[in-house]
Image: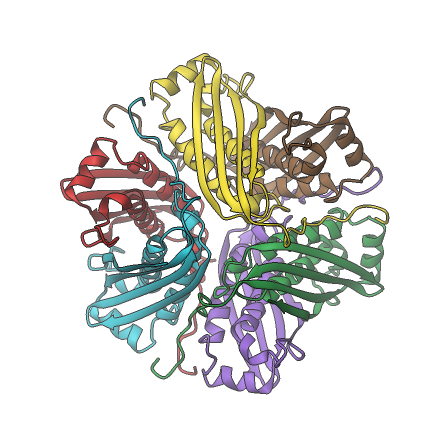
Chain colours: A yellow, B brown, C red, D cyan, E purple, F green
Amino acid sequence: MSGEVRVSMVDITEKPVVYREATARGFIRLRKETVNAIREGKVPKGDVLNVARIAAVQAVKRTWDLLPLCHPIPITSVSVDFNVREDGVEVTVTVKATSKTGVEMEALTGASIALLTVWDMVKALEKDERGQYPYTSIQEIKVVEKIKRA
Amino acid sequence: MSGEVRVSMVDITEKPVVYREATARGFIRLRKETVNAIREGKVPKGDVLNVARIAAVQAVKRTWDLLPLCHPIPITSVSVDFNVREDGVEVTVTVKATSKTGVEMEALTGASIALLTVWDMVKALEKDERGQYPYTSIQEIKVVEKIKRA
Amino acid sequence: MSGEVRVSMVDITEKPVVYREATARGFIRLRKETVNAIREGKVPKGDVLNVARIAAVQAVKRTWDLLPLCHPIPITSVSVDFNVREDGVEVTVTVKATSKTGVEMEALTGASIALLTVWDMVKALEKDERGQYPYTSIQEIKVVEKIKRA
Amino acid sequence: MSGEVRVSMVDITEKPVVYREATARGFIRLRKETVNAIREGKVPKGDVLNVARIAAVQAVKRTWDLLPLCHPIPITSVSVDFNVREDGVEVTVTVKATSKTGVEMEALTGASIALLTVWDMVKALEKDERGQYPYTSIQEIKVVEKIKRA
Amino acid sequence: MSGEVRVSMVDITEKPVVYREATARGFIRLRKETVNAIREGKVPKGDVLNVARIAAVQAVKRTWDLLPLCHPIPITSVSVDFNVREDGVEVTVTVKATSKTGVEMEALTGASIALLTVWDMVKALEKDERGQYPYTSIQEIKVVEKIKRA
Amino acid sequence: MSGEVRVSMVDITEKPVVYREATARGFIRLRKETVNAIREGKVPKGDVLNVARIAAVQAVKRTWDLLPLCHPIPITSVSVDFNVREDGVEVTVTVKATSKTGVEMEALTGASIALLTVWDMVKALEKDERGQYPYTSIQEIKVVEKIKRA
């Protein structure tokens, strides 16, 4: 173990409390039939996007408890937008806070959980006859923009 | 509201308790310098893969609390493997249980949180001088295999 | 302290695992204008009933963690129905499980959190000019039926 | 979905941090024999009011995690008082914080969980011979007062 | 990293579901004045032992979420007993379950959180004039007995 | 119940927000063979100290949810150090925050969960042939220092 860097939370005690904002975006590829079912509100488990939106907001607030070295941050705003495309669903999550550290991990966590929730809601439509998911895939979760303003 | 399908948890009361297994895989693209730092154990926040592994195991166990319509499942095994590639880190999560429903959402949640934790650990190495992440991106989270055995 | 009964969880180790079901119902009284806004989907914070429905499902799954002496129960089904009345919103929550103890506390917790979520969503419409809630009130949370079947 | 208001957390980033206080009150109707058992400390599961008090304090602190669109608030005080009446138990919960948004949902959540915990503690005394609860009912959870002071 | 053992949850999928019981015991050394205040019910924050008892029961149920590689276990009984000694408080926690793995970590976690809660409740009485705790100390948390019965 | 002090959270609303730091230390006695296995990285469940370190950081952040009357505190730093001794493992946890109340309970909770996690990781090495733990014991969890600076 000697020589290796020890796991530790970054010490942000002395950092100033400033305005923070971050936007993350992600995409889940779905079958065309599934996309149509989402658009027409015919997914058996219910309104896919609303459930995913709520799951995302809650995941943003819990990020400090999911990612071991994240600091607890007093989130003041979360917005979650979906763009239902031909080939799947794109989610954009924007998080705001007045805090000592940035909120990009919060936005990324919100986007990831939103996409996982979409998947969970459409499982029955995406599985093939052998119970596998040959087509479904979460793609391209990234940070669109990060803002820090004194 | 009329005409629309109502959100609801699938009723699995009558389903048999059988062996379940699912494997999910995901990939995060990282800068070459970051990959080297991970390999050499020189990431300032510590041993990236071990932290990500533990975060993944815990996320698997909490899936029912993160994805609104998932059922609580008595997980009996979680294994998390990393493959440090030239261009990033690949994670493979396998989950087992004896339960009334499958564990693919658990494996996918574990893989997603593992990759988010990797990102959180290497933030300082991936950010550019403007604090943005032009290169970092989570890619291709999918189910490799799902097994159900009576 | 002597003479007093000590707090303890009921020991259910030896109880048989049987089919359990419970239905709880609750009502929140709201202003007529608020009820109309819910019906017409014009509440500024969004689709009130869908958010409440999801909050209820999640609360049902967390009952063991909210009520100190409740046992963890493997919930297999939760359904949440709303009846938007002239004078407020009525919620009915049905929970099913195959377990050693009943699920009425789970159904009651789901109904309570559903109604609190409705309140949270319509706060802006229910507050008077002094920021008080002279009209809003949660009323009549009760167990409609409890079923136990070997 | 077009035309409908989208679910979103209210953006409180720019709101000032001021003193907040809220008091909520609720009542659970119980059988006379149960009320006597509570008064005499003879409820088999233990000291009903102390368990309910603690459950309420904890629920207040977790409100942001139970109600999907609530903001996390740094609670600085919670007090929980009971009034054991002839026909049941009344609970009053007061919450204080210095924060960007009010704490009435926290007080209401505390009162609700207190009453649910009372119910859980006296289940054995309230059930009839068929395992039903013909008499028990939570009634009248409301906000008594909300204070905001710059 | 090569050569080192990888972190992983033990695979208990194939283990039989049998009766499990474990008892853990722990002790916190306190000032004589504090012990007297506990005995006489004069601790300003309230009934120390009841709060500690409830915290212990809840911690037992959450052990899987606190210790990263623990499996979720359907706990069926928790009992928490205190022995107020001359020099401090001793706690004994017994946990039961019918499960694939033992419950000693659950009993130990319950005992630890019980003692930490006692400490939290009597902080004001244990601190010296400089705000330090020269005397207070948790001592001897151990497993008294572990039972496994087919 | 009359005459007894009622359980309540201390009201810290009016206290100033100042720098807080606390260090706690604890020790778990282990068999010599177990200590050697930890040192040589040969514990079957994996890298004991890294898992314990992460569990400690997370427990520090959740202290308000584990100890019923603790206030939520915005933790800004957690560091966890181990000293592998001949006869066991010593852990030292330091917590920092800028807050209205001290962080010693957070440091103590982190130390306790670190030691419990060590135990969980080496269970197989510490158990005797009858499945008992005659030697293992957590000892001496205490506060080393508490700092408050305006």
Q: Can residue B65 be seen from the camera position used here?
A: yes
Question: In the picture provided, is A138 more to the left or to the right than C76?
Answer: right
Front position in the image: E137 or A64: A64
Quarter that holds the N terminus of chain B: top left
* Residue B146 position (above or below residue E133): above
Displayed quadrant of residue D14: top left
* Residue E51 position (above or below residue E109): below
Question: In the picture provided, is A90 more to the left or to the right than B40?
Answer: left
Quarter that holds the C terminus of chain B: top right
Count of number-bearing discs: 0
Question: In the picture provided, is A91 more to the left or to the right than E69?
Answer: left
Residue shown at the point (46%, 86%) measured from the top left = E40
Q: Position of residue D131 (x, y in %)?
A: 27, 56
Q: Position of residue D110 (x, y in %)?
A: 36, 59
Q: Position of residue D86 (x, y in %)?
A: 19, 72
Residue shown at the point (84%, 62%) measured from the top left = F32
Q: Can residue E146 be seen from the camera position used here?
A: no
Front position in the image: D108 or F44: D108
Q: Position of residue D31 (x, y in %)?
A: 21, 66
* Residue E30 position (above or below residue C62): below
Front position in the image: E8 or A18: A18
Q: Name the residue at the front extreme.
A: A150
